[in-house]
Amino acid sequence: MGIFKACDVRGIYPDEINEEKVYRIGRALGTITESAPILVGGDVRLSTETLRTALTDGLRHSGCQVTDIGVVPTPVLYYARKKLGINAAVMITASHNPADQNGLKIVLGDLPITEQDLLHIKAVADSKEHISKLGSVSQEDIIDDYEQHLVELTSKYLEGITRMPKVVVDSGSGCFSDIAPRIFQRMRINRVKLFCEADGTFPERSPNSADPKALVDLSQRVQEEKADLGVAFDGDGDRVAFVDETGAILTAEQYIAIMALYGVCATQSDSVVLDIKCGSAAVESIAKSGSEIITERSGHTFIKTRMIQTGAVMGGEVSGHLFFRALDGGDDGLYAALLMTSIVGKHGKLSNLIAKLPHYPITPDLRIKVEKSGDILRKISEAFPSEQVTKLDGVRVAFSDGWGLARQSVTEPAITLRFEGKTPEALNNVIQRFLTPVPEIKELVNRKLSKGR
Protein backbone atom coordinates (compact mmCIF):
# COMPACT_ATOMS: atom_id res chain seq x y z
CA MET A 1 0.00 0.00 0.00
CA GLY A 2 1.57 3.29 -1.15
CA ILE A 3 -0.34 5.30 1.45
CA PHE A 4 2.36 4.83 4.12
CA LYS A 5 4.46 8.00 4.33
CA ALA A 6 7.34 9.06 6.60
CA CYS A 7 5.19 10.20 9.53
CA ASP A 8 1.64 9.03 8.84
CA VAL A 9 -0.74 7.30 6.43
CA ARG A 10 -2.31 9.40 3.65
CA GLY A 11 -3.99 9.07 0.29
CA ILE A 12 -6.83 10.06 -2.01
CA TYR A 13 -10.19 8.60 -0.97
CA PRO A 14 -11.34 6.06 -2.10
CA ASP A 15 -8.76 5.30 -4.82
CA GLU A 16 -5.72 5.12 -2.53
CA ILE A 17 -7.16 4.92 0.98
CA ASN A 18 -10.49 3.21 1.66
CA GLU A 19 -12.44 1.22 4.22
CA GLU A 20 -10.89 -2.13 3.30
CA LYS A 21 -7.33 -0.85 3.75
CA VAL A 22 -8.13 0.99 6.95
CA TYR A 23 -9.83 -2.13 8.35
CA ARG A 24 -6.64 -4.10 7.69
CA ILE A 25 -4.56 -1.41 9.38
CA GLY A 26 -6.88 -1.68 12.38
CA ARG A 27 -6.34 -5.44 12.48
CA ALA A 28 -2.57 -4.86 12.27
CA LEU A 29 -2.57 -2.30 15.08
CA GLY A 30 -4.58 -4.64 17.30
CA THR A 31 -2.08 -7.39 16.60
CA ILE A 32 1.01 -5.25 17.16
CA THR A 33 -0.31 -3.79 20.42
CA GLU A 34 -1.51 -7.23 21.56
CA SER A 35 -5.11 -6.05 21.84
CA ALA A 36 -4.23 -3.07 24.05
CA PRO A 37 -6.81 -0.33 24.71
CA ILE A 38 -6.77 2.28 21.96
CA LEU A 39 -8.27 5.71 21.38
CA VAL A 40 -9.90 6.73 18.08
CA GLY A 41 -10.97 10.16 16.80
CA GLY A 42 -11.57 11.75 13.42
CA ASP A 43 -11.82 15.07 11.59
CA VAL A 44 -14.72 16.65 9.69
CA ARG A 45 -14.00 15.17 6.23
CA LEU A 46 -16.88 13.46 4.49
CA SER A 47 -14.99 10.17 4.30
CA THR A 48 -13.97 10.14 7.96
CA GLU A 49 -17.10 8.56 9.43
CA THR A 50 -16.99 5.36 7.36
CA LEU A 51 -13.21 5.11 7.72
CA ARG A 52 -13.57 5.49 11.47
CA THR A 53 -16.10 2.66 11.50
CA ALA A 54 -13.77 0.46 9.44
CA LEU A 55 -10.81 1.22 11.71
CA THR A 56 -12.87 0.57 14.83
CA ASP A 57 -14.10 -2.75 13.41
CA GLY A 58 -10.55 -3.80 12.60
CA LEU A 59 -9.32 -2.95 16.07
CA ARG A 60 -12.30 -4.62 17.74
CA HIS A 61 -11.87 -7.80 15.69
CA SER A 62 -8.29 -7.97 16.97
CA GLY A 63 -9.44 -7.79 20.57
CA CYS A 64 -8.94 -4.09 21.35
CA GLN A 65 -11.01 -2.08 23.77
CA VAL A 66 -11.70 0.96 21.59
CA THR A 67 -12.63 4.34 23.04
CA ASP A 68 -14.19 6.48 20.31
CA ILE A 69 -14.10 10.23 21.07
CA GLY A 70 -15.88 11.22 17.86
CA VAL A 71 -15.17 14.25 15.67
CA VAL A 72 -12.37 16.24 17.32
CA PRO A 73 -9.28 18.29 16.43
CA THR A 74 -6.03 16.33 16.58
CA PRO A 75 -4.84 18.23 19.71
CA VAL A 76 -7.95 16.97 21.52
CA LEU A 77 -6.93 13.39 20.71
CA TYR A 78 -3.46 14.06 22.15
CA TYR A 79 -5.02 15.51 25.30
CA ALA A 80 -7.43 12.57 25.63
CA ARG A 81 -4.54 10.06 25.61
CA LYS A 82 -3.12 11.63 28.75
CA LYS A 83 -6.46 12.36 30.41
CA LEU A 84 -7.83 8.84 29.88
CA GLY A 85 -4.52 7.02 30.36
CA ILE A 86 -4.69 5.26 26.99
CA ASN A 87 -1.30 4.77 25.38
CA ALA A 88 -2.23 4.09 21.74
CA ALA A 89 -4.39 6.34 19.58
CA VAL A 90 -5.38 6.91 15.96
CA MET A 91 -6.67 10.13 14.43
CA ILE A 92 -8.43 9.81 11.08
CA THR A 93 -7.42 12.94 9.18
CA ALA A 94 -5.49 14.20 6.19
CA SER A 95 -4.62 17.29 8.24
CA HIS A 96 -3.97 20.21 5.87
CA ASN A 97 -4.40 18.20 2.67
CA PRO A 98 -7.33 18.76 0.25
CA ALA A 99 -10.83 17.46 0.95
CA ASP A 100 -10.52 14.47 -1.38
CA GLN A 101 -7.79 12.98 0.80
CA ASN A 102 -7.80 11.26 4.17
CA GLY A 103 -5.37 9.40 6.37
CA LEU A 104 -4.30 8.16 9.78
CA LYS A 105 -2.12 9.76 12.42
CA ILE A 106 -1.01 6.88 14.62
CA VAL A 107 0.35 7.13 18.16
CA LEU A 108 1.77 4.05 19.89
CA GLY A 109 3.47 5.68 22.87
CA ASP A 110 4.89 8.93 24.22
CA LEU A 111 7.35 9.31 21.35
CA PRO A 112 5.98 9.93 17.82
CA ILE A 113 5.69 7.00 15.47
CA THR A 114 8.69 6.40 13.20
CA GLU A 115 8.97 5.43 9.56
CA GLN A 116 10.15 2.00 10.69
CA ASP A 117 7.04 1.64 12.86
CA LEU A 118 4.83 2.47 9.89
CA LEU A 119 6.62 -0.05 7.69
CA HIS A 120 6.05 -2.68 10.38
CA ILE A 121 2.35 -1.83 10.52
CA LYS A 122 2.18 -2.09 6.72
CA ALA A 123 3.88 -5.49 6.77
CA VAL A 124 1.48 -6.87 9.39
CA ALA A 125 -1.51 -5.41 7.55
CA ASP A 126 -0.38 -7.04 4.31
CA SER A 127 0.35 -10.39 5.98
CA LYS A 128 -3.21 -10.80 7.27
CA GLU A 129 -1.78 -12.80 10.18
CA HIS A 130 -3.76 -11.05 12.87
CA ILE A 131 -5.00 -11.72 16.38
CA SER A 132 -8.62 -12.85 16.13
CA LYS A 133 -10.76 -12.19 19.17
CA LEU A 134 -13.60 -9.84 19.88
CA GLY A 135 -12.98 -6.58 21.69
CA SER A 136 -15.35 -3.74 22.54
CA VAL A 137 -16.20 -0.15 21.61
CA SER A 138 -17.27 2.67 23.92
CA GLN A 139 -17.85 6.38 23.36
CA GLU A 140 -16.33 9.19 25.41
CA ASP A 141 -17.01 12.94 25.21
CA ILE A 142 -13.76 14.66 26.05
CA ILE A 143 -14.23 18.13 24.52
CA ASP A 144 -15.49 19.86 27.67
CA ASP A 145 -12.51 18.54 29.63
CA TYR A 146 -10.13 19.69 26.90
CA GLU A 147 -11.60 23.19 26.85
CA GLN A 148 -11.34 23.54 30.61
CA HIS A 149 -7.76 22.26 30.51
CA LEU A 150 -6.81 24.76 27.81
CA VAL A 151 -8.40 27.65 29.70
CA GLU A 152 -6.47 26.71 32.85
CA LEU A 153 -3.24 26.29 30.90
CA THR A 154 -3.37 29.63 29.09
CA SER A 155 -5.13 31.97 31.56
CA LYS A 156 -1.77 32.93 33.09
CA TYR A 157 -0.65 34.40 29.76
CA LEU A 158 -3.59 36.82 29.74
CA GLU A 159 -3.12 38.10 33.29
CA GLY A 160 -2.43 41.83 33.53
CA ILE A 161 -3.72 42.71 30.05
CA THR A 162 -5.81 45.88 30.36
CA ARG A 163 -7.31 45.75 26.85
CA MET A 164 -7.90 42.38 25.27
CA PRO A 165 -6.95 42.29 21.58
CA LYS A 166 -9.63 41.94 18.94
CA VAL A 167 -9.00 38.70 17.08
CA VAL A 168 -10.45 37.31 13.85
CA VAL A 169 -10.67 33.54 14.26
CA ASP A 170 -10.58 31.65 10.94
CA SER A 171 -11.30 27.95 11.47
CA GLY A 172 -11.40 27.21 7.74
CA SER A 173 -14.53 25.04 8.21
CA GLY A 174 -12.32 22.55 10.04
CA CYS A 175 -12.23 20.83 13.41
CA PHE A 176 -11.85 23.97 15.52
CA SER A 177 -14.95 25.63 14.03
CA ASP A 178 -16.95 25.36 17.28
CA ILE A 179 -14.24 25.03 19.89
CA ALA A 180 -11.93 27.93 19.01
CA PRO A 181 -14.55 30.73 19.03
CA ARG A 182 -16.02 29.30 22.22
CA ILE A 183 -12.64 29.29 23.99
CA PHE A 184 -11.85 32.87 22.92
CA GLN A 185 -15.24 33.95 24.23
CA ARG A 186 -14.76 32.11 27.54
CA MET A 187 -11.49 33.96 28.01
CA ARG A 188 -13.21 37.31 27.35
CA ILE A 189 -11.22 37.93 24.18
CA ASN A 190 -13.04 40.06 21.62
CA ARG A 191 -13.28 37.65 18.69
CA VAL A 192 -14.81 37.74 15.23
CA LYS A 193 -15.70 34.41 13.60
CA LEU A 194 -14.66 33.57 10.05
CA PHE A 195 -15.44 30.24 8.35
CA CYS A 196 -16.51 28.70 11.66
CA GLU A 197 -19.15 26.34 10.26
CA ALA A 198 -17.66 22.84 10.11
CA ASP A 199 -17.81 21.42 6.57
CA GLY A 200 -15.67 18.52 5.36
CA THR A 201 -15.65 19.82 1.80
CA PHE A 202 -13.75 22.94 2.99
CA PRO A 203 -15.82 25.22 0.73
CA GLU A 204 -14.36 28.56 1.82
CA ARG A 205 -10.61 28.00 1.62
CA SER A 206 -7.92 25.34 1.55
CA PRO A 207 -7.43 23.48 4.84
CA ASN A 208 -3.74 24.30 4.46
CA SER A 209 -3.30 27.38 6.64
CA ALA A 210 0.35 27.64 5.58
CA ASP A 211 -0.72 28.58 2.04
CA PRO A 212 -0.84 32.40 1.74
CA LYS A 213 -3.69 32.10 -0.78
CA ALA A 214 -5.81 30.50 1.95
CA LEU A 215 -5.38 33.59 4.14
CA VAL A 216 -6.62 36.27 1.72
CA ASP A 217 -10.09 36.46 3.29
CA LEU A 218 -8.64 36.53 6.80
CA SER A 219 -6.34 39.39 5.86
CA GLN A 220 -9.23 41.37 4.41
CA ARG A 221 -11.48 40.70 7.41
CA VAL A 222 -8.80 41.81 9.88
CA GLN A 223 -8.57 45.14 8.08
CA GLU A 224 -12.35 45.55 7.84
CA GLU A 225 -12.83 44.81 11.54
CA LYS A 226 -9.82 46.90 12.57
CA ALA A 227 -8.73 43.84 14.51
CA ASP A 228 -5.40 43.44 16.28
CA LEU A 229 -4.70 39.94 15.02
CA GLY A 230 -5.96 37.18 12.75
CA VAL A 231 -5.45 33.46 13.41
CA ALA A 232 -6.13 30.61 10.98
CA PHE A 233 -6.17 26.89 11.75
CA ASP A 234 -5.57 24.01 9.39
CA GLY A 235 -8.09 21.22 8.83
CA ASP A 236 -7.39 19.23 11.99
CA GLY A 237 -6.22 22.07 14.21
CA ASP A 238 -2.60 21.22 14.95
CA ARG A 239 -1.22 24.03 12.76
CA VAL A 240 -1.86 27.76 12.90
CA ALA A 241 -1.02 30.84 10.84
CA PHE A 242 -1.15 34.54 11.76
CA VAL A 243 -2.05 37.88 10.18
CA ASP A 244 -1.06 41.19 11.81
CA GLU A 245 -3.28 44.24 12.31
CA THR A 246 -2.39 45.63 8.85
CA GLY A 247 -3.52 42.41 7.14
CA ALA A 248 0.05 41.29 6.45
CA ILE A 249 0.59 37.52 6.62
CA LEU A 250 3.39 36.54 8.97
CA THR A 251 6.06 34.17 7.72
CA ALA A 252 6.77 31.10 9.81
CA GLU A 253 10.13 32.58 10.78
CA GLN A 254 8.42 35.71 12.08
CA TYR A 255 5.81 34.07 14.27
CA ILE A 256 8.26 31.44 15.55
CA ALA A 257 10.65 34.22 16.61
CA ILE A 258 7.93 36.35 18.20
CA MET A 259 6.45 33.39 20.05
CA ALA A 260 9.85 32.48 21.44
CA LEU A 261 11.07 35.99 22.26
CA TYR A 262 7.91 37.41 23.82
CA GLY A 263 6.18 34.23 24.94
CA VAL A 264 7.99 31.15 26.16
CA CYS A 265 11.58 32.46 26.30
CA ALA A 266 10.85 35.93 27.68
CA THR A 267 11.86 35.08 31.24
CA GLN A 268 14.21 32.16 30.76
CA SER A 269 17.05 31.06 28.54
CA ASP A 270 16.27 27.65 27.17
CA SER A 271 16.60 25.51 24.07
CA VAL A 272 14.37 25.89 21.03
CA VAL A 273 14.09 23.23 18.31
CA LEU A 274 13.86 24.56 14.74
CA ASP A 275 13.53 22.60 11.55
CA ILE A 276 16.37 22.79 9.08
CA LYS A 277 14.30 24.86 6.62
CA CYS A 278 13.86 27.68 9.13
CA GLY A 279 15.31 31.02 8.03
CA SER A 280 17.88 33.17 9.77
CA ALA A 281 15.38 35.75 11.04
CA ALA A 282 14.20 33.25 13.65
CA VAL A 283 17.54 31.55 14.24
CA GLU A 284 19.50 34.76 14.85
CA SER A 285 16.79 36.46 16.94
CA ILE A 286 16.27 33.53 19.27
CA ALA A 287 19.99 32.82 19.63
CA LYS A 288 20.63 36.50 20.41
CA SER A 289 18.17 36.26 23.30
CA GLY A 290 20.41 33.65 24.91
CA SER A 291 18.46 30.53 24.01
CA GLU A 292 20.15 27.53 22.45
CA ILE A 293 19.07 26.59 18.92
CA ILE A 294 18.72 22.88 18.15
CA THR A 295 18.38 22.13 14.45
CA GLU A 296 16.34 19.10 13.44
CA ARG A 297 14.95 17.40 10.33
CA SER A 298 11.71 18.80 8.98
CA GLY A 299 8.69 16.76 10.00
CA HIS A 300 6.35 16.41 12.97
CA THR A 301 7.91 13.13 14.12
CA PHE A 302 11.45 14.47 14.20
CA ILE A 303 10.74 17.84 15.84
CA LYS A 304 8.45 16.44 18.52
CA THR A 305 10.86 13.59 19.32
CA ARG A 306 13.73 16.07 19.76
CA MET A 307 11.47 18.28 21.91
CA ILE A 308 10.76 15.37 24.25
CA GLN A 309 14.37 14.16 24.32
CA THR A 310 15.88 17.56 25.10
CA GLY A 311 13.11 19.13 27.18
CA ALA A 312 13.19 22.17 24.88
CA VAL A 313 10.79 24.95 25.79
CA MET A 314 9.49 25.30 22.22
CA GLY A 315 9.83 23.93 18.72
CA GLY A 316 8.94 25.51 15.40
CA GLU A 317 8.42 24.08 11.94
CA VAL A 318 8.05 26.18 8.80
CA SER A 319 4.87 24.27 7.91
CA GLY A 320 3.06 25.87 10.86
CA HIS A 321 3.51 23.30 13.62
CA LEU A 322 4.45 24.91 16.93
CA PHE A 323 5.51 22.61 19.77
CA PHE A 324 5.61 23.46 23.47
CA ARG A 325 7.09 21.89 26.57
CA ALA A 326 3.89 22.93 28.37
CA LEU A 327 2.11 20.44 26.08
CA ASP A 328 4.63 17.66 26.77
CA GLY A 329 6.38 18.54 23.52
CA GLY A 330 3.13 18.46 21.55
CA ASP A 331 1.51 20.90 19.13
CA ASP A 332 -1.87 22.60 19.41
CA GLY A 333 -2.88 25.40 17.06
CA LEU A 334 -5.37 26.86 19.54
CA TYR A 335 -2.84 26.96 22.38
CA ALA A 336 -0.42 28.79 20.07
CA ALA A 337 -3.16 31.22 18.99
CA LEU A 338 -3.97 32.10 22.60
CA LEU A 339 -0.29 32.59 23.37
CA MET A 340 0.08 34.96 20.40
CA THR A 341 -3.04 36.84 21.50
CA SER A 342 -1.46 37.39 24.92
CA ILE A 343 1.76 38.64 23.30
CA VAL A 344 -0.17 41.25 21.31
CA GLY A 345 -2.12 42.22 24.42
CA LYS A 346 1.06 42.77 26.44
CA HIS A 347 3.52 44.06 23.82
CA GLY A 348 1.39 46.00 21.36
CA LYS A 349 1.01 45.93 17.61
CA LEU A 350 2.23 42.78 15.93
CA SER A 351 3.61 44.80 13.00
CA ASN A 352 5.90 46.66 15.41
CA LEU A 353 7.22 43.39 16.83
CA ILE A 354 7.85 42.13 13.31
CA ALA A 355 9.71 45.34 12.41
CA LYS A 356 12.24 44.61 15.17
CA LEU A 357 13.22 41.30 13.59
CA PRO A 358 15.93 40.99 10.91
CA HIS A 359 14.62 40.43 7.41
CA TYR A 360 16.34 38.29 4.82
CA PRO A 361 15.02 37.36 1.37
CA ILE A 362 14.01 33.71 1.34
CA THR A 363 12.28 31.53 -1.24
CA PRO A 364 9.30 29.30 -0.61
CA ASP A 365 9.73 25.57 -1.05
CA LEU A 366 10.48 24.80 -4.69
CA ARG A 367 9.51 21.29 -5.77
CA ILE A 368 11.31 19.92 -8.83
CA LYS A 369 10.45 16.51 -10.28
CA VAL A 370 13.54 14.41 -10.97
CA GLU A 371 14.05 10.71 -11.55
CA LYS A 372 17.34 10.33 -9.68
CA SER A 373 17.09 12.66 -6.71
CA GLY A 374 19.87 10.81 -4.88
CA ASP A 375 22.31 11.67 -7.65
CA ILE A 376 21.32 15.33 -7.50
CA LEU A 377 21.95 15.51 -3.75
CA ARG A 378 25.26 13.69 -4.08
CA LYS A 379 26.55 16.08 -6.77
CA ILE A 380 25.67 19.13 -4.67
CA SER A 381 27.24 17.66 -1.54
CA GLU A 382 30.49 16.73 -3.26
CA ALA A 383 30.89 20.14 -4.91
CA PHE A 384 31.47 22.07 -1.67
CA PRO A 385 33.93 21.83 1.24
CA SER A 386 32.67 19.51 3.96
CA GLU A 387 32.62 22.31 6.56
CA GLN A 388 29.94 24.09 4.48
CA VAL A 389 27.73 21.02 4.11
CA THR A 390 25.12 19.64 6.52
CA LYS A 391 23.45 16.32 5.74
CA LEU A 392 20.93 16.19 8.56
CA ASP A 393 18.04 16.31 6.08
CA GLY A 394 19.09 16.26 2.45
CA VAL A 395 21.96 18.66 1.70
CA ARG A 396 22.25 22.13 3.20
CA VAL A 397 25.15 24.32 2.06
CA ALA A 398 26.13 27.40 4.09
CA PHE A 399 27.63 30.43 2.32
CA SER A 400 28.92 33.67 3.81
CA ASP A 401 25.86 35.50 2.47
CA GLY A 402 23.14 32.84 2.73
CA TRP A 403 22.33 29.15 2.38
CA GLY A 404 20.69 26.61 0.10
CA LEU A 405 18.87 23.38 0.94
CA ALA A 406 17.85 20.42 -1.19
CA ARG A 407 15.76 17.60 0.28
CA GLN A 408 14.44 14.40 -1.22
CA SER A 409 10.67 14.06 -1.35
CA VAL A 410 9.23 11.12 0.60
CA THR A 411 6.06 11.03 -1.51
CA GLU A 412 7.25 11.23 -5.13
CA PRO A 413 10.40 11.30 -7.32
CA ALA A 414 11.23 14.92 -6.63
CA ILE A 415 13.43 17.22 -4.60
CA THR A 416 12.41 20.28 -2.59
CA LEU A 417 14.72 23.28 -2.53
CA ARG A 418 14.83 26.44 -0.41
CA PHE A 419 17.26 29.36 -0.48
CA GLU A 420 18.03 32.42 1.63
CA GLY A 421 20.35 35.38 1.12
CA LYS A 422 21.37 38.39 3.18
CA THR A 423 20.16 40.65 0.34
CA PRO A 424 18.20 40.07 -2.89
CA GLU A 425 21.46 40.06 -4.82
CA ALA A 426 23.01 37.60 -2.38
CA LEU A 427 19.96 35.35 -2.68
CA ASN A 428 20.37 35.14 -6.44
CA ASN A 429 24.09 34.43 -6.06
CA VAL A 430 23.40 31.68 -3.52
CA ILE A 431 20.91 30.04 -5.87
CA GLN A 432 23.29 30.06 -8.83
CA ARG A 433 26.28 28.79 -6.80
CA PHE A 434 24.24 26.06 -5.14
CA LEU A 435 22.88 24.82 -8.48
CA THR A 436 26.12 25.03 -10.49
CA PRO A 437 26.96 21.33 -9.81
CA VAL A 438 23.53 20.27 -11.16
CA PRO A 439 22.92 22.05 -14.48
CA GLU A 440 20.22 19.46 -15.25
CA ILE A 441 17.88 21.19 -12.79
CA LYS A 442 19.36 24.69 -12.68
CA GLU A 443 17.26 25.99 -15.54
CA LEU A 444 14.10 24.40 -14.11
CA VAL A 445 14.62 26.14 -10.77
CA ASN A 446 15.40 29.51 -12.37
CA ARG A 447 12.29 29.21 -14.54
CA LYS A 448 10.14 28.42 -11.51
CA LEU A 449 11.59 31.36 -9.60
CA SER A 450 11.07 33.78 -12.50
CA LYS A 451 7.39 32.78 -12.70
CA GLY A 452 6.99 33.60 -9.04
CA ARG A 453 8.39 37.11 -9.39
Image (cartoon, rainbow, N blue to C red):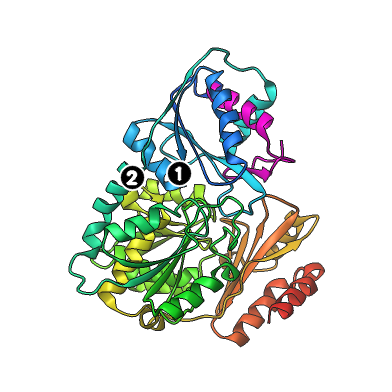
Residue extending farthest to the left is 160
State left or right for residue 405 relative to residue 275. right
- Dividing the image into 4 quarters, which one contains the C terminus? bottom right
- Please state the extent of the stretch shown in magenta in the rendering: 1-30
Secondary structure under the numbered disc 1 in the rendered image: loop
Q: Position of residue 387 (x, y in %)?
A: 56, 66
Does residue 311 appear in this view? Answer: no
Residue 3 within the segment the image draws in magenta: yes
State left or right for residue 412 relative to residue 9. right
**Badge 2 local density, few (<14 within 10 Å), some, or many (20+)?**
some
Q: Is residue 435 above or below residue 187?
A: below
Residue extending farthest to the top is 133
Q: Is residue 396 above or below residue 68?
A: below
Secondary structure under the numbered disc 2 in the rendered image: helix
Q: 381 or 160: nearer the eye? A: 160
Amino acid identity at mark 2: Tyr
Contact, mark 2 vs mark 1 (Cβ under 8 Å): yes
Residue extending farthest to the front is 197
State left or right for residue 426 relative to residue 78. right
Q: Quarter of the image holding residue 122?
A: top right
Does residue 186 appear in this view? Answer: yes
The residue where tag 1 is placed is 72
The residue where tag 2 is placed is 146
**Badge 1 local density, few (<14 within 10 Å), some, or many (20+)?**
many
Q: 233 or 37: nearer the eye? A: 233
> Looking at the rendered structure, which numbered label has been put on residue 384?
none
- Dividing the image into 4 quarters, which one contains the N terminus? top right
Comes first in the chain, label 2 or label 1: 1
Residue at the image point whose x is 45% and y is 55% from the top: 177
Q: Quarter of the image holding residue 120?
A: top right
Amino acid identity at mark 1: Val
Q: Position of residue 241 (x, y in %)?
A: 47, 65
